[in-house]
């Protein structure tokens, strides 16, 4: 039976944080079986519309949702939004995830390698994989954008810190901040269509802002002359990804694999851009947007997870079919955190 969508246009959005976290998990679950398949293989299995139904009881997610929950609980547990309180809690949650028997969902090697060093007590700036800007940096950042009470400087610092513990490349940091910022402004009422411009403005404003209070000496890597030069490289690559997004949106929607236009999503800035492309192509039909994101030749689960986070933040829980919330893995944790941060 096909999922029953709530009629559009949507009611006034409510429970945006819950909608965002659930959307992330729904996209993750729909993209989990299609990752590593070609578009032709996905369409043979699911038809041209792609996967549109949760399967399994519960519907299983991947490390994307697991690590988003790790970030979420670290934020929930921290008495203050400071590096001193958040870094050890993020470290503990990441390490616990890395050794959990539930960590059997093809986790990223960068995260595993960095977590092994974190478990040894290595200073995080040395434990991180300095050259990696994989999407593991921002697939998990959604909770940072949901926390009520964070100002934009705090959001930026927390987003970059959680990325930096495993992915030390400046583009991973910048893309994580932009992803968290996108979730934040959508929860605050920004329109989906306004996101590309808002993200571009943010990237330009932050172009040479190195958050030393959060990142310490992470910038001191071979070939880097200054903290500002280090972080500017990340913002430049994000701006290039946004250029590709703008060019893709200017084209007619002809069924082309979004990965051919904005990248396959294995790296952080491409995961952001391709997820946004899927969400913006179907702003009022979230299930179709997730199916499109899952019907891609790239990192389908991460692309669909981020698309779901954006659409849920924009539309709240009304975005999603009735009944899905009781069928998704980790439903209790997702809804508990969501209720905590709902506006």
Image (spheres, helix red, strand yellow):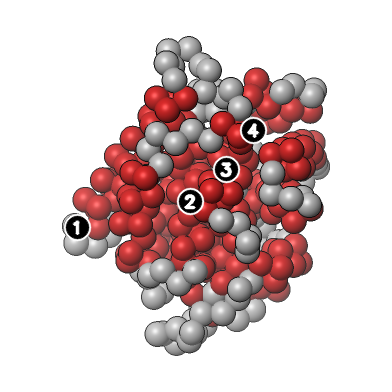
Are the two marked residues, 1 and 2, in contact with CB atoms closer than 8 angstroms? no
- Which residue extends farthest top? 222
Circle 3 or circle 4, nearest the eye: 3
- In the picture, the quarter occupied by the C terminus is bottom right
Name the mark on residue 179. 2
- In the picture, the quarter occupied by the N terminus is bottom right
Name the mark on residue 157. 3
Circle 3 or circle 1, nearest the eye: 3
Q: Residues within 10 Å of mark 2 (few under 14, many from 20)?
A: many
Cα distance between the residues tagged 1 and 2: 22 Å
Are the two marked residues, 3 and 4, in contact with CB atoms closer than 8 angstroms? no
Image quadrant where residue 143 sits = bottom right
Q: Nearer the viewer, residue 297 or 201?
A: 201
- Residue under pointer 4: 165
* Labels 1 and 4: the sequence-earlier one: 4
Q: Residues within 10 Å of mark 3 (few under 14, many from 20)?
A: many
| Residue sitting at x 69%, y 49% | 81
Circle 2 or circle 3, nearest the eye: 3
Cα distance between the residues tagged 1 and 4: 36 Å
- Residue under pointer 1: 250
Are the two marked residues, 2 and 4, in contact with CB atoms closer than 8 angstroms? no
Image quadrant where residue 85 sits = top right
């Amino acid at each position: 039976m096909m999922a029953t969508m709530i009629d559009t246009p949507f009611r006034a959005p409510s429970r945006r944080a819950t909608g965002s976290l659930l959307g992330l998990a729904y996209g993750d679950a729909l993209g989990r079986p299609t990752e590593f398949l070609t578009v032709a293989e996905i369409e043979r299995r699911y038809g041209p519309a792609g996967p549109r139904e949760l399967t399994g009881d519960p519907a299983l997610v991947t490390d994307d949702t697991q690590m988003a929950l790790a970030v979420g609980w670290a934020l929930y547990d921290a008495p203050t939004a400071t590096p001193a309180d958040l870094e050890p809690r993020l470290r503990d949650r990441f390490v616990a995830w890395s050794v959990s028997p539930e960590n059997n969902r093809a986790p990223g090697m960068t995260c595993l390698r960095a977590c092994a060093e974190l478990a040894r007590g290595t200073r995080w700036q040395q434990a991180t994989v300095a050259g990696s800007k994989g999407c593991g940096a921002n697939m998990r950042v959604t909770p940072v954008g949901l926390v009520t009470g964070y100002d934009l400087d705090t959001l930026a610092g927390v987003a970059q810190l959680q990325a930096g513990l495993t992915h030390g490349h400046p583009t991973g940091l910048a893309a994580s901040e932009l992803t968290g910022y996108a979730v934040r402004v959508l929860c605050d009422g920004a329109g989906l269509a306004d996101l590309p411009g808002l993200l571009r403005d943010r990237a330009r404003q932050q172009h040479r802002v190195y958050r030393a209070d959060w990142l310490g000496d992470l910038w001191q890597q071979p070939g880097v002359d200054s903290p500002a030069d280090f972080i500017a490289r990340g913002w430049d690559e994000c701006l290039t990804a946004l250029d590709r997004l703008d060019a893709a949106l200017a084209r007619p929607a002809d069924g082309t694999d979004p990965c051919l236009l904005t990248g396959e999503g294995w790296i952080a800035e491409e995961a952001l851009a391709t997820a946004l492309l899927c969400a913006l192509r179907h702003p009022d039909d979230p299930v179709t947007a997730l199916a499109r994101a899952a019907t891609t030749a790239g990192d389908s689960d991460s692309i669909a997870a981020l698309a779901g986070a954006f659409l849920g933040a924009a539309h709240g829980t009304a975005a999603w079919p009735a009944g899905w919330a009781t069928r998704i893995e980790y439903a209790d944790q997702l809804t508990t955190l969501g209720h905590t941060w709902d506006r």
